[in-house]
Image (cartoon, rainbow, N blue to C red):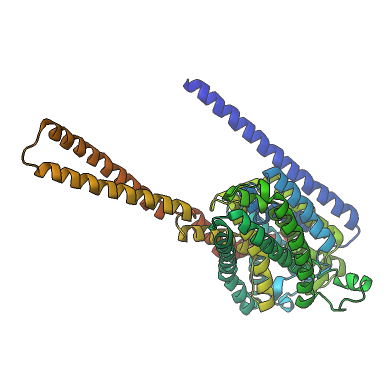
Amino acid sequence: MEINTIKKLEKKALKSSGFDFMRLGIALIFIVIVMFYTMATTGNISNSMFLVVATIFGAYMAMNIGANDVANNVGPAVGSKALSLGGAILIAAIFEVSGALIAGADVTNTIRKGIIDLNAFSNVDIFIWAMMAALLAAALWLNLATYFKAPVSTTHSIVGGVMGAGIASGGFGIVHWATMGKIAASWIISPVLGGLIAALFLFSIKKTILFQDDKIQAARKWVPVFVAIMAWAFTTYLTLKGLKHVWSDITDVLNFLPHTKKPTFGVAAIFGVIIAIITFILVKANITKKAQTLKNDRNAINILFTIPLVFAAILLSFAHGANDVANAVGPLAAINDAVINGGISSKSGIPLWVMAIGGFGIAVGLALYGPKLIKTVGSEITELDQIRAFSIALAAAITVIIASQLGLPVSSTHIAVGAVFGVGFLREFMKLEKDNEEILKKELEKAEELLKIMVIELDELERKDNKEKEDYENIVSLYEKIDGQEKIIKRLRKILKKEEKTEYVKRDMLKKIVAAWIITVPVAGFFSAIIFFVIKGMML
């Protein structure tokens, strides 16, 4: 028996090992393709080997983004069963690449938010080494975080890498500490804001729909409203974040739009209102059509949020590809600019091939190593269904809109994960679902009332002077019934007490993720400083 078990374990281990080697092989093939492409297209440029090595680091970084960061966009949809794991990976891969290539940054601040002083670099080579160190350090940290199943911020990883390399090359004075203070503030602002907004929407759905006697009638009234809000939020969000890089091209075609450098909030909000009204009408008609076939329970309401949730995963992936990919490959774009032009610039164009490395690298990393973090975000923090996942996706979009208008520094990763925690803590705060609580309390009240009746009846029989045989038999029977009833009451009280103490958020996961967030910048910075000194030692 034990030998058979050992053989089964050996087969499972070999199968797992073979799969790991296959994934590693595919990842290496992608890196080799990127390397040969860079060598073929930049071979006649001075210092081209720096660019080749940096491109390898960039490809590695992109795959780690796919393995870690993308989970925030599709994890809730997978955890709620609105999407299968394979479907989520396919959707995310397609729309991450689309976002990067269609609406990716054509000009971006390569040194994220001006965290270091470029004038402090003594020469171009030192700058290139620093950017290479930042890129590799951020990728290594993301790889480590993914291994420990901790979703962390890609942007913060890059920020830490640039800061560490900057300090190693030019001292602590090279860092703009006021900017770093704002970034540190986002560790608190992002998850708290995302969590509060997600909890607010979940509570609103519960009050307006789930806690109503006629849930279907309530859904006909309120589901179109919530989905329309989602349509407004994502349209506004995508207009502000996804179209800012191609806005001038759009205004050239559509002359009636304001000819600004990027879409204003007013224009984005108007676009959002138009799409929201159309969405409201379509969803209202669809629910009215389905109402006759739906049961009056939570599962039926969950079904109504499934399609909007799939659209949310698509839009979040597209927006992530349009924005965060550019941030991640920023150092690579800076190195490319420095190698080709022989100088240091605070802003430089991101070539299409660099964006392609970012987009396709994310798709490869997501397909190979993304499932681990998708499962973590989707099911290992708190239990999700479509309603809860919808609240999380909606909170992610609205939080970014609010923060961008108020000028608050936020992280999309922290927002999404904070929203998951917010949903979990709301469930914990509300304790039992309303229906379960009432049923348990009513059962306990009935059990206690029945016990009182039994005790009174027993007391009357024991006080009786001339007891007959039947009376003694009844007394014995009542003692047994009272004992059994006390056990029932004890069990019901235990169930209620246990339910009240139920933790809907896994504390170990909470501690691990918060710890990873706090150490992201300093650890990435430490890695980057070490790598910079290694590169410098090799080159001098």
**Residue 456 seen in the current view:** yes
Q: Nearer the viewer, residue 407 or 428?
A: 428
The location of residue 124, given as percent across then percent down, is 78, 70
* Percent of width and height locating residue 217: 62, 56
Left or right: residue 201 versus residue 41 is left
Image coordinates of residue 397 in percent, x first then y, are: 68, 65
Quarter-of-image position of residue 54: bottom right
Q: Quadrant of residue 257?
A: bottom right
Q: Is residue 197 above or below residue 454?
A: below
- For the point 71% across and 54% down, the residue is 288
Q: Is residue 120 left or right of residue 253?
A: left
In this figure, what is the number of numbered marks? 0
Front in this rendered view, residue 537 or 32 = 32
* Of the pair 422 and 124, the residue shown nearer to us: 422
Q: Nearer the viewer, residue 157 or 384?
A: 384
Residue 49 seen in this snapshot: no
Compared to 305, does 105 lie above or below? below
Q: Residue at x 62, y 30 (%)?
A: 14
| Quarter of the rendering occupied by the C terminus | bottom right
Which residue is painted at 71% across and 61% down in the image? 135
- Residue 229, percent across and down? 69, 66
